[in-house]
Every structure is written in C-alpha cells, then in structure tokens.
Image: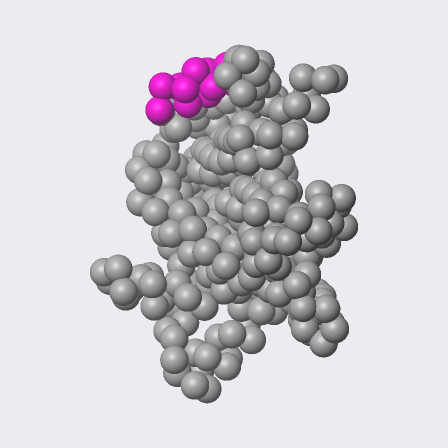
Amino acid sequence: MLRGLPRRIAGLLATLLAASFVIFSAVYAAPGDPAVLLSGSRQELTPEKLAAVRAEYHLDEPLVVQYGRWLWESAQGDLGRSFQYRDQVADLIGARLPTTLELVAYATVFFVVLGVGSGVLAALRRGWADSAVVGGTTLAASIPSFVAAIALVSLFGVQLGWFPVTGQGEGFTGRLHHLTLPAFALALGALAVISRVTRQAMAEAYASDHVEAARAAGLTEREIVVRHVLRNALGPIVTMCGLVMAGMLAGTVVVETAFGLSGVGSLLVSAITTHDFPVTQAVLLLMVIGYVVVTTLVDLVHPLIDPRVSLAGRAA
C-alpha cells in the first residue's frame, strides 16, 4: 500500500485538476452574462458600467487566465465572494457543511447496518427470508429519493407526528431526531445496493472450497460464517460502502431541499438558480474532492481488508 501511495496521490491530483477545469469552464459556459448579473439594475446598465464590472472581476481576461487565478486562489483557501450574498464563499460553505456531513454520516449508519444485516440474513436463511429481502430491496431501489422523502414526511411527520419535517434541531439528540427522516430517505436506495452486494459476496464465499474444508474439519456453522464466509466477503462490501458514501456527498441536494435543511446541497440549488458562479464552482469542486478522496482511501484500505488483492497485484 505504501509503495503505491505516491502513484495514487499523483492520480488523485491529476483527477482533481481535470475536474476543476471542467467545473470552471462549464459554469462560465452557462447561459447568461455574469457581468450583467453583477451590475445590478438593468435600467442603469451601460457599456461603461459593464466594462468596469468585467475589469473588476477579471471577466475580460481569457478563460485560461481566469481559471489559473481561480485555481491558485482556491488552493490558498480563497474561494471568492458570493454574487448573491456578498459574503466569502468559504464562510458560506463552512456554515452549511456540518449539516451535510452529519446527514451523510447518519445515512451511512443506516445503509451499513440495515444493508449488511439484511444481506447476511438473505445469504444465511434461504427461502422466505431471502425472497423477502430481495423483494424489499428491489422496491427500495426503485423509489427515487424525493418520492421517499415525501412519503416519509407524510406518514411519520404529518400523520403520526413522530419526527419533525424541517430544521436541524438543537443539541445532539435534537439533531439526531431532526435528521432521522432525511437520513433514511437518503439511505434507502443505498441500503438496497449494499444488501445485494452483501448477499452476492456471501453466496460466493459460501461456495468456495475452503468453506467445505472447514466444514469437513468439524467447525461449527457460526465459526465458518465469521472466520471464512464473512471475512472473505468483507472486501467487496467495504468497497461498495465507501463508493456509496462518496456518492452521497453529491446526492444530498434533493433530500436537503425536501426537508428544508441548510446544507451544502440546498446552497448549490440556490446558487444555480441565482447564477451565483463562485458558490456553484466551490460547491461542485468540494463534492468532487470528497468523492475522489473517499474512493482513493477505500482503494488504499482494500488490500488491508483482503490480502488476496495485494497478492494478485504482486503476481501481476
């Protein structure tokens, strides 16, 4: 793992560089002139005022020069100033990022515990339990997150009144209570994916020769499951959990909007609607960084979980 670390870091930096250029270029390629939006009232818009605004925000420079300045300032922690809020973008993101991270962490607990648990149950208990898990996960995977959010709000928030449907809450228990419904709505589709992966990995591990040898050696079924089946299936399960969690960092937009959470996802929606380019660029770049970093860490940890991956790499 240590030998491959420099190569993976170099690949991570190259990926982030390419992604940052695509994000910067795509935002400025969107319809609408940023100078017009920054000029304020259209009634007082004059060519001289437009030229002054373009010069102030360096919009009159070539795209590559603008990108280089933005990249250099972003690397130093200066993400620019919001067109809409007239505040530092870093401060806006810093105020909303904890809510998004808490939501993703809570949803991760849901899909790991319930997804892995249901997958293990389906692999160990063939018959009605397996059919119930497969049917339930198929239904969960077919429900979009915004539909799940509306259904959860209607049932548990409005009719039963068990959970609040807006806000973040105060204190640890209050935030946990407020984030339960959004976290479950966010985790529902991921739960189905993790359950299917766990079930398949467990089934393949059960069919291996060393499991038959362990059973012939007199090991109990519990020992076989813990030492041989689940341990050998842990690699793909952990890898998929990491990939799903990384994808959630960019998938909170719908859930945050549905539940009125002041997170990074809702900030992105507001920035896109108002053509707030600095905020849009910073949030998209943050999501890309989160995804790339998490997937790289999962890739580095995988050989530690499953030594067969390291051995296969050496043989290759």
The residue sitting at 34% across, 47% down in the picture is 98
Quadrant location, the C terminus:
top right
Residue extent of the magenta highlight: 66-77
Q: Quadrant of residue 192?
A: bottom right
Q: Quadrant of residue 262?
A: bottom left
Depicted 243 relative to depicted 103: above or below: above
* Residue closer to the observer: 163 or 150: 163
Number of numbered discs? 0
Depicted 292 relative to depicted 169: above or below: above
Q: Is residue 242 shown in magenta?
A: no
Depicted 50 relative to depicted 147: above or below: above
* Residue closer to the observer: 43 or 66: 66
The residue sitting at 46% across, 79% down in the picture is 156
Give how far across and how far down residue 178 sits, in percent: 36, 66
Give how far across and how far down residue 32 sits, in percent: 59, 38
Quadrant location, the N terminus:
top right
* Residue closer to the observer: 164 or 281: 164
Residue most toward the bottom? 159
* Residue closer to the observer: 47 or 275: 275
Q: Is residue 57 at least partly visible in the picture?
A: yes
Give how far across and how far down residue 46 sits, in percent: 48, 31
